[in-house]
Amino acid sequence: MAERSRTAETGTAIGSDEIIAGNVSKYTVLPPGYCGQPKKGHLIFDACFESGNLGRVDHITEFEYDLFIRPDTCNPRFRVWFNFAVENVKESQRVIFNVVNFSKTKSLYRDGMAPMVKSTSRPKWQRIPSKNVYYYRCPDHKKNYVMSFAFCFDREDDTYQFAYCYPYTYTRLQHYLDNLQRRNMDYFCRELLGLSVQKRRLDLLTITSPEDKTDLENSVMQKKIKIPKLSLNHVEEAGEVTDYGEEDAELRHSKRQDGRKQSEGTHKSIEAVVARLEKQNGMSLSSTSSPEEVFMEASEGMNNMDDAVVPRILYEELLRSYQQQQEEMRHIQQELERTRRQLVQQAKKLKEYGALVSEMKELRDLNRRLQDVLLLRLGSGPAIELEKVKAESVEPEPEVQKTFNEEANTSTYFPAPVPVMDKYILENGKVHLGSGIWVDEEKWHQLQVTQGDSKYTKNLAVMIWGTDVLKNRSVTGVATKKKKDAVPKPPLSPHKLSIVRECLYDRIAQETVDETEIAQRLSKVNKYICEKIMDINKSCKNEERRENAKYNLQ
């Protein structure tokens, strides 16, 4: 007891690979550094009873214990079963038991099964609620599988017993068999097959009808059927080892006396049967002829062939095996045909997709060239940018505003992006993004190293519009529904929104080629710009509050 207590005080310092000699017996787990008699709540573990299994207990905290179960006999790799008792509990004491050295990767504990529990006042086994049971791989225990369950003791005087599932002991089985044997039933027979290493009975049970119990083996072996002889040596060896009766022995003895004639007839029968089977296997799998008919036709069509006596059970087993193989071959061919059709369809789709991708790239290059040519013909970029800024400061007409709203509300708009980032025009410290929009070259290079789509879009929007324009605009031009008296603000220019989407598309296209992912990330452009506008308005309000507070203090 003292040695086991010292082990508990060291906690998990001892490795989990040490050999667990036997089950714990009335083992008191004390907290580290505690000296003296155990108190209420210092749990006492016991597994020294039939079907018990618990080799070691480690004290983790006041409420948590690590349990190590012993492996199966003569097989240290399998550790599943546990069954132990706990006493000296305290009322309303809550604990967590971790069975830390399970060997199974898949367990029914993942699908709702729970350990069993009973106590002295409630001797009927019950399951712990599955919501208190967890089965997982734990890195703290060399990635072994751990089953943890929480439990609350409700009675101090009770002894609680926990088990993997319903225990069924060897003693209980022997009592059950003894009761059956005392009843002297005609259809039940119990025999001693042998003894185990620990000198326990190994029983052989026979359950059959009374009239068949004595002649079971003879009735099976005497049922025979005549089929073409497939191997003379195999039948002769079987005749030497197996005892089929005196009449069969005389029959085989008379056949052996024929000598060379018997051997020649047998070889002819083998060649005929093999040729017949090869011909049958070459036919279509959908043929309606059964293997039994093949054997019967082969036997009827051969001349000068001797018949061999073979047990019916062996023949039927071979027949069933042949039928199963035929059925499996049929299923495999159907599965191969289905897979071939699927591969052909996928190859066609991939070919079409590749053609579409190449065509899209050509169209994007052509679109960019056309935009550059038009911009060069229209004039310098910065002058156009100043005119656009002045036009944005004026509130648009109602009809124009309606058109802007329809274009701005299109969240699934796909721009014509630049395939590579170095195709943007650099001139006089400015970068031309398209549609007459120029930005500072240094800010543009800083933007390219920005992490995340949200931050990239917000910074680009500030570069294109500026904070003074953004705080007085909205993405869609529709008043918010959160405020009753909200006034709609002018929408952002659709052509500039398209430039933002183009730039973001060029950035995303360098990271992935998945069109679904690109569309999903582009659909959040309006959301990012709305967040930026809200942030600018919020910072402006905060600045106004600070100025008002400063004015009031003065």
Image (cartoon, grey):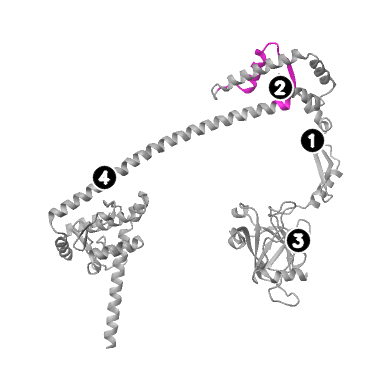
Q: Nearer the viewer, mark 3 or mark 2?
A: 2
| First along the sequence among labels 4 and 1 | 1
Q: Was residue 298 drawn as part of the magenta stretch in this picture?
A: yes
Dot 1, how many residues are within 10 Å of its Cα: few (below 14), some (14-19), or many (20+)?
some
Find disc 4 in the rendering and name its residue. Answer: 362
Q: Where the N terminus falls, by quadrant?
A: bottom right
Q: Where the C terminus falls, by quadrant?
A: bottom left
Query: Tag 1: residue type?
Result: Thr
Per the model, the C-alpha gap separating discs 4 and 3 is 76 Å
Find disc 2 in the rendering and name its residue. Answer: 231
Q: Is residue 149 above or below residue 2?
A: above
Q: Using the image, tell me which numbered label, if any, was put on residue 23.
A: 3
Q: Using the image, tell me which numbered label, if any, was put on residue 226.
A: none
Dot 2, how many residues are within 10 Å of its Cα: few (below 14), some (14-19), or many (20+)?
few
Q: Position of residue 20 (x, y in %)?
A: 73, 60
Q: Nearer the viewer, mark 3 or mark 1?
A: 3
Q: Was residue 144 drawn as part of the magenta stretch in this picture?
A: no
Q: Position of residue 363 (x, y in %)?
A: 25, 45
Residue in the foreground of this view, choosing between 113 and 376: 376
Residue in the foreground of this view, choosing between 341 and 293: 341
Q: Secondary structure at mark 2?
A: loop
Query: Tag 4: residue type?
Result: Glu
Dot 4, how many residues are within 10 Å of its Cα: few (below 14), some (14-19), or many (20+)?
few
Q: Secondary structure at mark 4?
A: helix
Q: Which residues are magenta?
A: 287-315
Q: Using the image, tell me which numbered label, if any, was put on residue 208.
A: 1
Query: Tag 2: residue type?
Result: Ser
